[in-house]
Amino acid sequence: MTTTEARQSSPAPMDYALLAKLTGGLGDRKTVERIAGDFGRLYADFLPDVFNSETGIPIEVTYTGCTSGLMTDLITDLGDTFALADGSLRNWCANFVLACGNSFVIGLMERMLGALPETVEQPFERPLSDIELDLAQMVVGKMGDVLRSGVNAPGGFEALLERAHNAEDRPQPDEGIPAEFGVTIRMTIELGKVTSELALVIPQRAFLKTKVVMPKAKGQSSKSKEEWHERIKEQVRRSHVTLQARIRLQPLTLGTISRLAVGDVITFQDKKDVSVQVSANGKDMYSCELGRSGERYTVRVKDNISTDDEILNHLMG
């Protein structure tokens, strides 16, 4: 047999989708939609109760549909308006993804800081700040709690979630890991005037074996709205903030400014102690005086312009 004849007689590689169906990694449309609907009802019925009991803030969750495809494509198709967290749950699934719409987190931050419901408008979509990602971590944590209760995995283990991150910061998938089919379960979430989305991306190999159980709603939780607020404040206190120092210089005419060249000197306006305003994120915080320590210039705090609560609320907003 020649090389050409051997090549012609070699069997063609099996279609990947067909192989996945034969090995339990890809379900038919009817089965996928049925199980996805069960997940949707789980979140629509249970997440608002959990959320309201812990924060005192009412939300509404509605299942909107599901999509089947490769896991990497499904995650990419979510777009740039989600905060994502990779998760695993022992005895159920080792690699699922929870996603929360950025606009929900932004609106929730305003509400947690005491804004009246009628004043919180639909925010512009943008990546979340580090402090907002801390809040997003709490939200996906509640999503993980509902998931754990609903899939009823043996052993009663907690869902393990990695740090929430903006979609634009998600690393590229490892090409060495075989592609697998998954399903995206999408839901709308409403917080007053703010409408956003939640999503779960689950490998079908685990998804198809899942029998969703509706847990009993909890009337109360050990956490309270005040505890959540304190947790957010604590995250702010531990966050690094860039400070800016503003010093008033001697007034100059526009003509003089236009002729400034390298080496020209502009003097401070103050002749004795130089007054410095220190701010963060555009908020004036302290009145200081200019000094020096060794080779570095410094500022020494003379007076507080804002109270502790005003500073924290500004930075969290």
Image: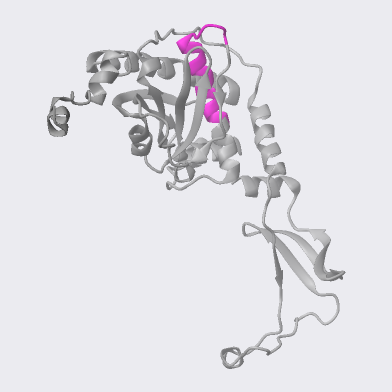
- Magenta-colored stretch includes residue 143: yes
Q: Nearer the viewer, residue 139 or 24?
A: 24
Can residue 110 be found in the magenta stretch?
A: no
Identify the residue shown where x is 38% and y is 10%: 209
Across and down, in percent, residue 147 comes to 48, 17
Q: Quadrant of residue 175?
A: top left
Q: Nearer the viewer, residue 295 or 117?
A: 295
Residue 13 coordinates in the image, percent (x, y): 22, 26
Q: Which residue is pictured at 65% across the width and 23% down the height? A: 224
Is 32 left, or right, of 5 in this rendering? right
Residue 84 location in percent, x, y? 47, 35
Q: At 23% across and 14% down in the image, what residue appears?
A: 30
In this picture, residue 173 sits left or right of residue 35: right
Q: Which residues are magenta?
A: 138-156
Residue 80 higher or lower than 63, as above or below: below
The N terminus: image quadrant: top left
- Residue 243 visible (yes or no): yes
Furthest residue toward front: 1
Instruction: Confirm whether residue 114 shows in the render.
Output: no
